[in-house]
Amino acid sequence: RPFGCADCGKSFPWASHLERHRRVHTGERPFGCPECGETYSQSSHLLQHRRTHASDRPHKCGDCGKRFAAAAELAAHGR
């Protein structure tokens, strides 16, 4: 593993993985949501977050009115 972190010594097989890891130490969060401004250190985390803005949310909580994209999410909310 030729790419080592100067801060903690952890090593990675690819430079891109070291670059992603470095954000743990720097606090950099370069991936921002264009809808709400929330930021993330990894693009995959932003993609996961973007699903929260999905417009198709047919499952509505009868108690609070919150809507969910999946029935399982509504069921978990009610627990």
Image: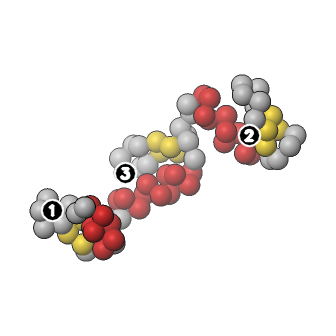
Q: Which mark is residue 6?
A: none
Q: Nearer the viewer, mark 3 or mark 2?
A: 2
Q: Residue at x 22, y 63 (%)?
A: 78
Q: Residue at x 25, y 74 (%)?
A: 58
Q: CA distance from mark 3 to mark 2?
A: 29 Å
**Can the viewer see residue 57?**
no
**Can the viewer see residue 38?**
yes
* Residue bearing mark 1: 65
- The way the protein has been coloured in the rendering is secondary structure
Pick whichever of labels 3 and 2 is earlier in the sequence: 2
For label 3, the SS is loop
Amino acid under disc 2? Leu
Q: Is residue 8 above or below residue 66?
A: above
For label 1, the SS is loop
Q: Nearer the viewer, mark 1 or mark 3?
A: 1
Q: Which mark is residue 18?
A: 2
Amino acid under disc 3? Glu
- The x and y percentages for residue 56 are 31, 71
Quarter of the image with the C terminus in it:
bottom left
Q: Residue at x 12, y 62 (%)?
A: 63
Q: Residue at x 79, y 38 (%)?
A: 11
Quarter of the image with the N terminus in it:
top right
For label 2, the SS is helix
- The x and y percentages for residue 25 are 62, 29
Q: Is residue 49 above or below residue 24?
A: below
Marks 1,2: beta carbons within 8 A? no
Amino acid under disc 1? Gly
- The x and y percentages for residue 5 are 76, 31
Q: CA distance from mark 1 to mark 3?
A: 21 Å
Q: Which mark is residue 35?
A: 3
